[in-house]
Amino acid sequence: MLIGLKLEQRALFCGCGDWSPWISDVDSRHCSQHMFDAYTFSHVQHGVLFFAGLWLLRDRISREWRLWVALFLEAAWEVFENSAFVIHRYRTATIALGYEGDSITNSLCDTLACVAGYWLASRITWKWSVAFFIAVELVLLAAIRDSLVLNVVMLVYPLEAIKQWQLGG
């Protein structure tokens, strides 16, 4: 993942000189450049989803290997998410008009967030995992007018009505 991100010319950290670990403003140029932002929670959701999907393979793949597969999937997403194609798609189809891709530090922290979500899902029942996933969706929708589900919808099949709602209209 690190090699892929470096080949995509991702910066190590935000170039502004502000070393704050958390950035709350998703509309600023700092979003996705520091360690954590509101979208970190969607990567926790990735981990929950990966655990659920890979749990179906529990009879064929050991617990340890399922975690490695989840880690690989998240790392692959981070490289793909930072490709010119996806960055352009975010800029044209979603509210992330000024999105420039993630810093390497942000991608690493997003990957750790995925592992945290995977770990959480492995420790709670599937019902609590579903409740957690929905709760994160609702909190993100209320806080930033975006979420993992909306992000996927807007990347795959953008809807102008959703974009206008996200923009506050």
Image: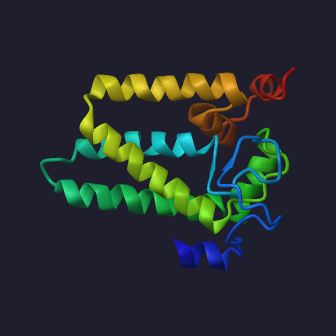
Residue that extends furthest to the left in the rendered view of this protein: 59
- Give the tally of numbered discs: 0
Q: Position of residue 145 (x, y in %)?
A: 71, 27
Q: Where's the C terminus, which quadrant?
A: top right
Left/right placement of residue 36 relative to residue 128 reads right
Q: Residue at x 54, y 57 (%)?
A: 109
From this view, report whether residue 133 is shown above or below residue 2.
Answer: above
Q: Nearer the viewer, residue 56 or 142?
A: 142
Left/right placement of residue 42 relative to residue 85 reads left
Q: Quadrant of residue 142?
A: top right
From this view, report whether residue 9 is shown above or below residue 23.
Answer: below
Q: Is residue 103 visible?
A: yes
Q: Position of residue 136 (x, y in %)?
A: 52, 29
Left/right placement of residue 146 relative to residue 91 reads left
Q: Position of residue 96 (x, y in %)?
A: 78, 44
Q: Position of residue 128 (x, y in %)?
A: 33, 24
